[in-house]
Image: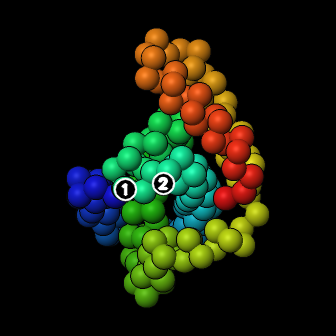
Amino acid sequence: MSFTLLIIQIIIYLGAFLLFRTTHLDSVFVLLITLLSIVINSIVFRFQRTTLGIARAMGYSDMQNIGSIQSFLTPDFLSAIHWINTVLSAISFTLLGVNLSWILAIVYFIYIFIVTGIMDIFLPKPTHKFCIGVIKKHLNNQRRRSKSIETLALTVQVMGVIDEVKTF
């Protein structure tokens, strides 16, 4: 993650804290928001893990190139979901701390940033096959819309790698 994105995420968390620090809501509502955030976070993480596997299968090892390929493979709607999830995570963290317990908020924070990677092994949905299907559909759309030779060449290269790689 780049330094700029880290700063933006910190600002989002601070903004959520300042907005919701005095908000007291029903604990069931807070837990539902938190559960929604966990589910969205798991979906986004699985998709990112799939794009990372494709980038590595293409032979990229440095973070800048991997990030570029992951951006190329990620549909716009999923990028939007990622940012919505960042805001939702910040709101969930703050509401958990204010309405229930700051210890629970810290446990949630640890889950979102550390345990999600471990849980990816056990969570059945979305499957990598589904993620690859979304990527292929996105690449086909890019191929139809693109006028750039470089984009067309990269699309064909990625499609070949996806077909060669069986599992991630």
**Which residue does the image show at 48% across and 54% down from the upper left?**
85
SS for tag 2?
A: helix
The numbered mark at residue 131 is none
Quadrant of residue 149 within the rendered picture: top left
The percent position of residue 12, horizontal first and vertical second, equals: 30, 57
Q: Which residue is mark 2?
A: 85
Side of 85 relative to 23 (left or right): right
**Residue located farthest toward the bottom when viewing the structure as drawn:** 103
Quarter of the picture containing the C terminus is bottom right
Give the vertical position of 88 relative to 111 (above or below): above
Q: Nearer the viewer, residue 69 or 156?
A: 156
Q: Nearer the viewer, residue 11 or 94?
A: 11
Report, in whole angstroms, how far the alpha carbon at label 1 lies from the one at label 2.
26 Å
Quadrant of residue 3 within the rendered picture: bottom left
Give the vertical position of 40 relative to 77 (above or below): below
Q: Which amino acid does the dot numbered 2 rest on? A: Asn
**Which residue does the image show at 47% across and 24% down from the upper left?**
151
The numbered mark at residue 62 is 1
